[in-house]
Image: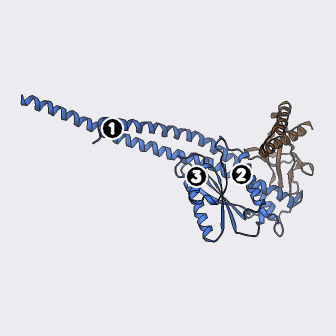
Chain colours: A brown, B blue
Amino acid sequence: MTTFHFELVSPARLLFEGPVESVVLPGVEGDMTVMANHAALMTSLRPGVVTIADGKASKRLYVRGGFADINASGLTILAEQATPVEDLNPEIIAAEMKNAEEDLRDAKTDEARRLAAEKLGQMTDLMAALRN
Amino acid sequence: MPSLKDLRNRIASVKATQKITKAMQMVAAAKLRRAQMAAEAARPYTERMERVVSNLAGGMSGGSDNPLLSGTGKDQVHLLVVCTAERGLCGAFNSSIVRLAKERINQLQAGGKTVKIFCVGKKGYEQLKRQYEKLIVEQMEFRAVKQISFNEAEQVGRRIREMFAEGQFDVATLFYSRFKSVIAQIPTAQQIIPLVVPAVAGNSDVSYDYEPEQEDLLADILPRNISVQVFRALLENAASEQGSRMSAMDNATRNAGDMIKKQTQKYNRTRQAMITKELIEIISGAEAL
């Protein structure tokens, strides 16, 4: 199978770079699978799981707040946050979710409320992504 | 003529200072490595972000209506985002950024523009406050933050976007120090609003599909790009600060060494002179008997 160049970068670091066979990414208007010689496309991503397949193994990463740029030179995903799915623990996330809910209830200032709401939103997205 | 005791005290105090500067240099060297790695790890993201933005904006026929890209159509009020360090004792690092900002302020004011200043970091705020207190509209400090992460950049970026949405300024420029090497840090001014799109290299004729529409995508990506640029500036600054501190402390340690050498020589000479004097006194006393 033909491969193409794929890069996944977050502000903290370059997470993946190399040839792959296919990448499934969660576009805002639906999931899509990108293979070699895909038409040039630019899309923003909703929070979800990106699945990378390079013929032998597949790798799953959770991304949040990102864009995908597909052109002749390959696919680039820019994500504000990206974590391998194996590193995520549903129990920890559930606990964090509960924490954030409490914070939201107890928040006194607007800033604290905004932070807690943001956290809760992130955790809810994570849970939803893990379930499917 | 200082007494022997004075000289001894002076040597001891210089030695104590040398120990401090030596320790600071070593700490800065260790931190520099980490900061440099962080700055380098973030480079791919900012580079690709730039490429995506230029692809997107370049593919736009007839330009965009997004004010972050096209500007407000005016050039009257300038916001200078001056990013400096939280701590001093790092050579000319802070003052060189501030100097660049001051030059720009004077130039803009001479041109009849209104200037507003947004200080990120304590040292720049302190230096700018003396002369331009009335112009400073916003100030942020990350003193408690050990390692700059995207969150801090996002805070700054959000505040800039809020101010822009409220129509508080027309043009925003970011001031920071670009890390070239340990001995070279270049104070840099970078305009972030309206965004200056670098010319697309070659493939501008590629016709993209967009999901969602191009304008919506731009409206999503441009605000994020501001935070990314701030993030890059903060990381470059962190590396520059440590590099600058390292060479400043290296100099200080060497100067202290020179000083100790000179003082010790003086101390020994004075001591010898006193011994000789005492001997002469004893001998001439014995001869007189």
Whether residue B114 is situated above or below residue A59 in the rendered picture? below
For disc 1, the marked residue is B7
- Cα separation, mark 3 vs mark 2, equals 19 Å
The subunit carrying tag 2 is: B
Q: Are marks 3 and 2 in contact (CB under 8 Å)?
A: no
A56 relative to B262 in the view: left or right: right
Q: What residue type is labelled 1?
A: Leu
Q: Name the residue: 59% across, 66% down.
A: B106
- Count of numbered labels shown in the rendering: 3
B38 relative to A37 in the view: left or right: left
Q: What element carries label 3?
A: helix
Label at residue B107: none
In the displayed image of the protein, which residue is found farthest to the front? A108
Q: Name the residue: 51% across, 46% down.
A: B247
Q: Nearer the viewer, mark 3 or mark 2?
A: 3
For disc 2, the marked residue is B156
Q: What residue type is labelled 2?
A: Val
Quadrant position of the N terminus of chain B in the picture: top left
Q: How crowded is mark 1: few (under 14 residues within 10 Å), some or many (20 or more)?
A: some
Q: What residue type is labelled 3?
A: Glu
A52 relative to B252 in the view: left or right: right
| Any part of residue B279 in sight | yes
